Amino acid sequence: MCGGTGFDVNAGYTNEEARATVLVDLLHMAIVCDLTRVATLQFTMAQSHMNMYPLIGIPYDLHEIGHSSHGTMGVSRAIAWHVKHFARLVAKFRDTPEDVGTMLDNTAIVLLHEGGHGYDPSAAKMYSSHCTENMACLIAGRAGGLKPGRHVVAPANNHPANVLVTAMNAVGVPTAALGQVNGSIAALTT
């Protein structure tokens, strides 16, 4: 479903805005009710052909935005839609009392987006949405000494999996690696 003049702004959309809202609510409730303490929430993927027009006003599906004239700015708007729902989940944890604080005090919540903004060596292209540089990675919560509310620029040799290793360590999973990626990001806890 490519963009342009022949794009059907109604095709490939089944009210993903409402679906994302309900998924956030269900995840929050499952953890509040102690049905689980670990969860994964995925709204889309980079190869998704979900119609983004109703969500961000760009007449392309999620995958094609990165190949369109909207390029990285369009992809940034798509990432912002994901971040909006991530922020809503974080706020629900912040607003849920637990022990002497809130659920957010005892939680690590991570958002990773699989596309970045930078040089794509496979295409020899700058400002590619298929780059593995400058990927959006957010971590929220205070579990295990996480320090919230800061922008941390990780060294160039870090990988998004280093954020996951940091979160895993924060919630008590003693690991130094995830797959082939070794190490955590100390700046997230100091």
Image (cartoon, rainbow, N blue to C red):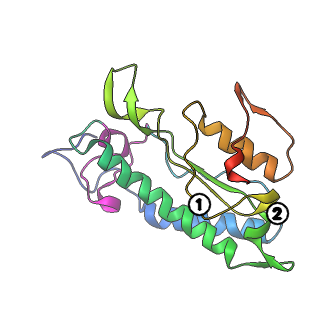
* First reached walking from the N terminus: tag 1 or tag 2: 2
Q: Which mark is in front, 1 or 2?
A: 1
**Residue 67 sits above or below residue 139 on the image:** above
Residue at 67% from the left image edge and 38% from the top image edge: 162
Residue at 24% from the left image edge and 51% from the top image edge: 59
**Residue 134 sits above or below residue 177 on the image:** below
Q: Image check: 5 left or right of 117?
A: left
Residue 168 appears at what percent x and percent y?
A: 78, 46
> Label 2: which residue?
35
> Label 1: which residue?
150
**Residue 154 sits above or below residue 55 on the image:** above
Disc 1 marks which amino acid?
Answer: Arg
Magenta segment's dominant SS is loop
Residue at 20% from the left image edge and 41% from the top image edge: 69
Looking at the rendering, the stretch of residues picked out in magenta corresponds to: 47-66
Between 77 and 18, the one nearer to me in the picture: 77
Quarter of the rendering occupied by the C terminus: bottom right
Disc 2 marks which amino acid?
Answer: Leu
Residue at 33% from the left image edge and 20% from the top image edge: 124
> Mark 1 near mark 2, Cβ–Cβ under 8 Å?
no
- Element assignment for label 2: loop
- Element assignment for label 1: loop
Classed neighbour count for the residue bearing mark 2: other residues with Cα under 10 Å, few (<14), some (14–19), many (≥20): few
Q: Which mark is residue 179?
A: none
Q: Image check: 146 left or right of 75?
A: right
Between 178 and 127, the one nearer to me in the picture: 127
179 inside magenta stretch: no
Question: In the rendered image, is residue 19 in sight?
Answer: no
